């Protein structure tokens, strides 16, 4: 039976589970360990955990210094603060010298819910994608998150990873032959009529949308792009050539994120219709997470509607 767990919780578990295998691992937090779920690591390895207080820019600079000394820092705060308040330090202190720091942004997207528009970060993919050499990740479920943490520990270089607040159903553990690799997407469901490219919690919705489409006689392929940068160009090109139309779905602004990355690539090599699904260039608002997602049409039914649009444009 698949588990239901927030990716932030799976992330916290992975840090503790991998601590002995990776003695260079150190964890920094901006006084949010109860929310980012680094509290387990703090309890298990107090000498390797640093609560930097509400000083995200300073925390990022300290992480850079630790990396320069051979440590493997995971730097934690909310996505809004990691991508916003500390962006200059991420760019200049971590990415420019290409230091081995993992910047982890929890509570990304509209599903933060009641915290409202100021904390519902829908720009982090775009902001971090724009930094040269920055790897950008958004795992969709608990099993994928645990594999992502280990992969990041083995990866030498700067990276940004988004965590989600809500508990989500696991889907990747039920896919035969599933394999996690940084920079490589995964085919969760094959199909010949349209391809749905999803990231983060929209992967689960994409799978549900594919079921809705199946009832309508549409055979939808679902690709899990846990890595937004670098994009898996080979898998994307194969899907574009075989299904001839694409839908992208993300809990992010449609400008600058996964959909933009897909359009940027395919426009030059295989210009097929690409319909982007996400937040339509507007701020979020406060409310219960599920109600907010529905208000902004981040639902399986809305993805299925976008697939119908893509199919209508297909030649």
Image (spheres, rainbow, N blue to C red):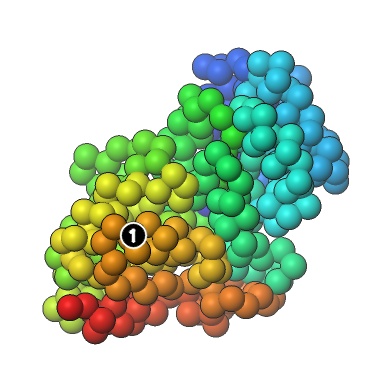
Residue 129 location in percent, x, y? 55, 51
Residue 287 location in percent, x, y? 66, 76
Q: Nearer the viewer, residue 287 or 280?
A: 280
Residue 138 location in percent, x, y? 49, 50
- Which residue lies under the disc numbered 1? 268
Q: Nearer the viewer, residue 57 or 296?
A: 57
Residue 308 appears left or right of 4: left
Q: Nearer the viewer, residue 285 or 34?
A: 285
Q: Nearer the viewer, residue 309 or 151?
A: 309
At horizontal 64% and vertical 48% (from top left) the residue drawn is: 105
Q: How many marks?
A: 1
Residue 124 appears left or right of 77: left
Residue 34 visible in this rendered orientation of the protein: no
Q: Is residue 234 above or below residue 198?
A: above
Quarter-of-image position of residue 67: top right
Which quadrant of the figure contains the C terminus? bottom left
Crowd band around label 1 with a 10 angstrom C-alpha radius: few (<14), some (14–19), many (20+): few
Q: Is residue 304 above or below residue 14?
A: below
At horizontal 42% and vertical 60% (from top left) the residue drawn is: 264
Q: Is residue 104 above or below residue 165?
A: above
Residue 188 location in percent, x, y? 26, 53
Secondary element at image label 1 = helix
Quarter-of-image position of residue 243: bottom left
At horizontal 39% and vertical 64% (from top left) the residue drawn is: 263
Residue 68 visible in this rendered orientation of the protein: yes
């Amino acid at each position: 039976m698949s588990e239901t767990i927030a990716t932030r919780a799976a992330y916290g578990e992975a840090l503790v589970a991998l601590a002995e295998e990776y003695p260079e691992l150190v964890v920094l937090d901006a006084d949010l360990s109860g929310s980012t779920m680094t509290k387990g690591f703090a309890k298990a390895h107090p000498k390797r955990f640093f609560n930097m207080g509400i000083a995200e820019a300073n925390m990022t600079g300290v992480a850079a210094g630790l990396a320069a000394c051979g440590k493997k820092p995971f730097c934690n705060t909310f996505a809004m603060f990691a991508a916003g308040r500390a962006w200059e330090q991420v760019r200049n202190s971590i990415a420019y010298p290409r230091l081995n720091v993992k910047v982890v942004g929890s509570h990304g997207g509209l599903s933060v819910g009641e915290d409202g528009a100021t904390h519902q970060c829908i720009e982090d993919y775009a902001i971090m994608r724009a930094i040269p050499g920055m790897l950008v990740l958004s795992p969709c479920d608990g099993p994928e998150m645990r594999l992502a943490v280990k992969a990041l520990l083995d990866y030498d270089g700067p990276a940004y990873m988004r965590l989600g607040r809500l508990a989500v159903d696991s889907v990747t553990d039920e896919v035969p032959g599933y394999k996690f690799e940084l920079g490589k997407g995964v085919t969760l469901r094959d199909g010949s009529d349209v391809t749905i490219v999803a990231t983060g919690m929209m992967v689960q919705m994409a799978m549900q949308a594919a079921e809705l489409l199946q009832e309508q006689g549409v055979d939808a392929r679902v690709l899990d792009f846990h890595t937004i940068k670098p994009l898996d160009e080979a898998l994307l090109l194969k899907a574009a050539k075989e299904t001839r139309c694409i839908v992208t779905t993300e809990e992010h602004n449609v400008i600058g994120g996964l959909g933009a990355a897909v359009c940027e690539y395919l426009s030059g090599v295989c210009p097929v219709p690409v319909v982007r699904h996400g937040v339509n260039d507007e701020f979020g608002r406060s409310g219960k997470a599920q109600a907010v997602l529905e208000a902004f049409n981040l639902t399986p039914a809305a993805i299925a509607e976008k697939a119908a649009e893509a199919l209508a444009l297909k030649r």
